[in-house]
Image (cartoon, grey):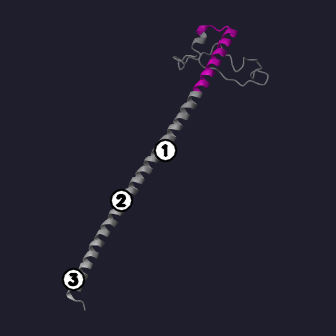
Amino acid sequence: RMSGGGRRFFRVVQTYVAIERSKHDRTREELASQIESTDEWRRKARTKKEGTDREERLSKQNELTVKMCREEIGTLREALQIAALDVAAMKEKTGVSDQVMEGVVDVDVVEIDSNGGDSNGDVLAPAIHPLPEEVIVEDSSADGYELD
């Protein structure tokens, strides 16, 4: 059996232990809250980084697409210039008037055999099929475009 002073000391120690336990519990809860907050910030940072990475990939992909389109435009411009020169050469060769050629923007494509002739055996200018004079195609789709 404990004396009165021993009981008081025991209650003081129990009170002190309870206070320290309560502090420990609050510290543990605060730590858990801080860990949860840190994890949330990490998730947000990871999401933002993934978004930034995706935007960078899309930007590079768009730049590549623009570059490819510019190259294609350059190729098409060169093809149009060559076609214009071929049409001019054909016009000069066949003596077709400017009035007849004015509305023609379509070029017939024919298969050329190894001898440079078409299926009828006619020898043609490289990759040009002369349009019959009675067939004139009027198309304004090329209006407003200038060749360099």
Secondary structure of the residue carrying tag 3 is helix
Residue 49 on image: x %, y %:
46, 47
Callout 1 environment at 10 Å: few (<14), some (14 to 19), or many (20+)? few
**CA separation, marks 2 and 1?**
28 Å
**Horizontal arrangement in the rendering, residue 32 relative to residue 52 (left or right):** left
Find out whether residue 74 is within the magenta segment.
yes
Q: Which numbered disc flags the more N-terminal residue, 2 or 1?
A: 2
Camera-side mark, 3 or 1: 3
Residue 103 on image: x %, y %:
57, 14
**Horizontal arrangement in the rendering, residue 132 relative to residue 115 (left or right):** left
Q: Which residue is mark 3?
A: 8
* Near-viewer residue (25 or 97): 25
Picture quadrant of residue 147: top right
Name the residue type under label 1.
Answer: Asp
Picture quadrant of residue 22: bottom left
- The segment highlighted magenta reads 72-99
Please tell me which residue is depicted at 79% across the width and 22% down the height of the picture: 115
Q: Which numbered disc flags the more N-terminal residue, 3 or 1?
A: 3
